Amino acid sequence: MDRAISLIDQFPALAGLDLTIEAGEIVLIRGANGAGKSTLLRLCAGLAPLNGGAGRVLGYDLSNRDQRRRLRREVGLLAHETFLYDELTVEENLMFWARANRVDPSSVEPVLDRLALSGRLRNIKVARLSAGQRRRTSLAVMVCRRPRLWLLDEPHGGLDQAGRNFVDGLVNHAVGFGATVLIASHDIDRSSVLATRTITLAGGQVQAHRAGADPVLDEPTDDAAEEQLRAP
Amino acid sequence: MLRDALLMARKDLRIELASRVALGQILPFGALVLIMFGLAISPDLSVLGADERSVLAQVSPGLFWMAVLFSSLLTLGRSFAIESSDGNLDALKMAGLDPAGVFLGKAGAVIVQLLVLELLLGFGAFVLYDAPLSDVVLLVTALILATTAVTVAGTLYAALASGLKVRDTLVPLLVLPVLAPVLLAATLATEAAVFGSSEDGWSWTMLLGVFALLYLGIGMLSFGPILEES
């Protein structure tokens, strides 16, 4: 990203962000609420607009609509939304998204097993799942996609200890196969164990870079982010 | 494109079968509209010298299509509510589905639902309004073409408004004026099929076909940019 600007409802959620991430990195993105973490992930997914500056993800130019469309197929996003249909069962959701993503439907079964969704949960409607079970189902859809770039927004949110350990295992497994991972999280203790680099956002810009985990830094406050926004 | 359309249509119909919103809420709503029209226009009311049929029977094609139109607004709103409720439009974009396929699939699922609804409401209209039927082929053709025109135009506008908080109130305001010519042609074609003036009916039905093709073409071409901005 080179001075990347992304406007959400006319508000500069990213305001001149500079950032380079190498393939195979696990980058933890920190920042107060409204610092631009989720927008950065959505920009990297080709979903948020690039309104200024330049940006290239997996070799695709974010300012080019066709390239942005092609990028989306190679990216997996775990967002606050589940991207699931409440009225369909876990298995029906996975089968639909596997077909929509042009993934062999036979790959769904091993993923259900791997994410402990193959028991009675597979036939339960998503609307009746707990938050943690929904999160696991969203993760299962993402694993089926086999993305080159994993964009995880609060990946440990709503999960129990076993689920959190499982997410960590998935991330390391994906990186082992050449994927790159961006994690936006407030759960610094947990995510910093995974990260090879930590960046801190404030006011839609990169405030600090640190190699490796950075659990000692205090989480920036909303006030600090506001001050950063007001700065000339 | 057709593969994506079938995938979307199957998924939408599966969701409707599971949720039973169409059968449990939209069909009763349509039936209530028919009944309310029946109460508002007395079945004993007739115009002297004009026709031996009651006024209610004479205007039954128009009342039937009004009931269908109101019900279609709910069906169309529901069709996009299931996509926008939990970020699924973003997931559809990320899947790289052909936008024209998504459009055809969503419209196709709504057409199936509306045709079932029309079958049941049509039966209700015959019973409640004491309407006759003279040309079944013309009626079925008009129903299919009018439903296609209503659905493809409505799908476009429902998609346009899907990202907005005011979509529930905005969609009827956008769709109803666009569908006014379809309502007119559908009512006149149905009148011909019901009361027996088939020659006029077929010309109105052909016009419905033109509307359906026109809206279908516009929808397939413009759905990509609309989906991108939603």
Image: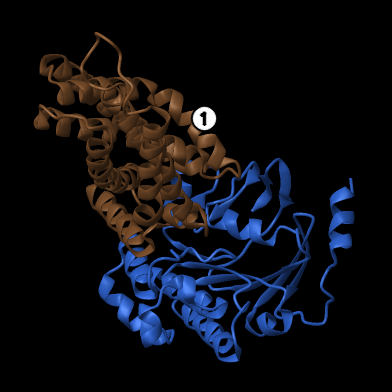
Chain colours: A blue, B brown
In the image: residue A132, left or right of residue B32: right
Residue A50 position within the rendered picture, expressed as x and y whole percent measured from the top left: 61, 45
Q: Nearer the viewer, residue A96 or A142?
A: A96
Residue A21 position within the rendered picture, expressed as x and y whole percent measured from the top left: 61, 65
Q: Is residue A127 visible?
A: yes
Q: Which residue is mark 1?
A: B173
**Kind of residue at badge 1:** Leu
x 21%, y 18%: residue: B204
x 38%, y 67%: residue: A88
Question: Secondary structure beneath disc 1?
Answer: helix
**How many numbered circles does the render carry?**
1
Quarter holding residue B167: top right
In the image: residue A78, left or right of residue B45: right
Quarter holding residue A181: bottom right
Is the residue B64 above or below the residue A153 in the image?
A: above
Quarter holding residue B139: top left
Is the residue B33 above or below the residue B215 in the image?
A: below
| Chain containing the residue with disc 1 | B
Residue A86 position within the rendered picture, expressed as x and y whole percent measured from the top left: 45, 66
Q: Residue furthest top?
A: B49
Neighbours of disc 1 within 10 Å: few (<14), some (14-19), many (20+): few
In the image: residue B204, left or right of residue B63: left
Residue B96 position within the rendered picture, expressed as x and y whole percent measured from the top left: 38, 53
Q: Nearer the viewer, residue A166 or A63?
A: A166
Q: Nearer the viewer, residue B110 or A147?
A: B110
Q: Is residue B1 visible?
A: no
